[in-house]
Image (cartoon, rainbow, N blue to C red):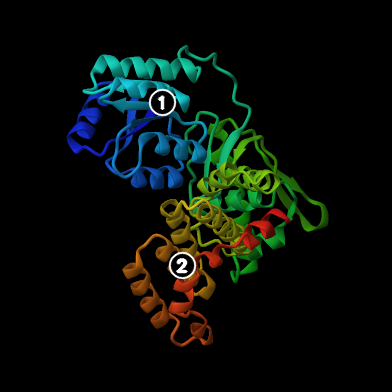
Amino acid sequence: MIRIIAVDDELPALRGIGKVLEQFEQVHVAGLFDKPVACLEYVLTVQEPIDLVLLDMDMPTMHGLELARRLRECRPEIHIAFLTAYEEFAKDAFEVEALDYLLKPIMKEDMARAIGRFLKRSGRDAEPVPQPDTGIAVHSLGPFTVLAHSGNPIRFRNSKAKELLAYLHHHQGKPVNKVQIMEDIWYGRDTQRTQVNLHTTIYQLRKDLEPCGLSDPIIQSKLAGGSYSLHWSVSFDDVVAYEEEVRRFKRTSSLTHALKALQLYGGGYLSGSGYVWAAPRQAELELGYAELLEAVVNIYVRQQRYDIALNPMRKWAELLPLSVRLHAKMIALLILMNRESDARSYYNVVRELLDQSEDASEIEYDSITAHPSRYFSDETIDKLLSQ
């Protein structure tokens, strides 16, 4: 399936593009946007892949070429095809390595040509030779999900079997003493009953994994009171991928790696699970995520790309609602965006929120508005890169 989004400030033209795309069985229309900024925010936050973006060249708020450059910075793997009513724009389109340009009104034949070029350039024009899958995909950033060799999620008989697998994977193949497992997963329960629960859950979990071709990855040891460990071939682990992108960002200072890390983070480590034993790791990853968000905001502001900085700024604010420094930066960003009315309203809400806090006096509206840029120094970026 080819995931495509389209951007055109003229709604009738945008709807027409959507209707043309619906005629292709192999195409999934992931989004239709009449505002470039809305498209950027979507691309920054969506975790699913985006294969092809159809961009109108001539939009009043942001030219298609500029939008293409920004999209490529966020997601270098994206392919771009331009939509234009003027043939002379074609040369400019190819300066940003555009896949194609389509003259309006867009016809099915034109779209078929663009899709064909995408398939050829991306290497998907021929059916790939099936390769045996030697591993599985584990997603822990967000709800815990395991995809089997077939690509289908593993179904668990009960919530404890799922939690036990998440717990053993959390320990990365290290043996965990049975007593520790019982305390972490069945805290406060009767010891004798908990032992029965553990053995039953191990049995159920093994049964859950059998249909997926996993030949008993749970290893039991009887040494030192007994322990369990998990040994399986994982082809993708989103936590590992996230931390690798963070390391690459620290090593190269490339915004591309920072944005990939933000996309991978999703809702956070085992979010919504309620697993108490996961709390320390959740806090560790969340702290790094907050630092990464601030670094990205600072980079965008330094580049005077204030509209794009707003989205990671909001995410950061959701993480730290009582951070005085964060709220000061949000007000400063709104000032830089020439949204003084919004900045004043935000300031009033924050003052009321922090009214009982001794730190509330640190937010002075006039001081922020006098020098808003100083709130976005390179200090956070330097600190993160030096770790």
Q: Is residue 333 left or right of residue 379?
A: left
User: Residue 278: which quarter of the image?
Assistant: bottom right
Task: Find disc 2 in the rendering and name its residue.
Answer: 332
Badge 2 or badge 1: first in the primary sequence: 1
Q: Is residue 2 left or right of residue 297?
A: left
Residue drawn at 52 percent across, 34 percent down = 76
Of the pair 110 and 371, the residue shown nearer to us: 371
SS assignment at label 2: helix
User: Residue 107: which quarter of the image?
Assistant: top left
Point out the frontmost of discs 2 and 1: 1
165 in relation to 372, above or below:
above
CA distance for labels 2 and 1: 36 Å
Residue 203 can be seen in this image: yes
User: Residue 55: which quarter of the image?
Assistant: top left
Of the pair 4 and 99, the residue shown nearer to us: 99
Q: Position of residue 171 (x, y in %)?
A: 69, 52
Residue drawn at 48 percent across, 38 percent down = 153
SS assignment at label 1: helix
In the rendered image, the residue lying farthest to the top is 126
Q: Position of residue 218 (x, y in %)?
A: 67, 43
Task: Find disc 1 in the rendering and name its residue.
Answer: 92
23 in relation to 364, above or below:
above
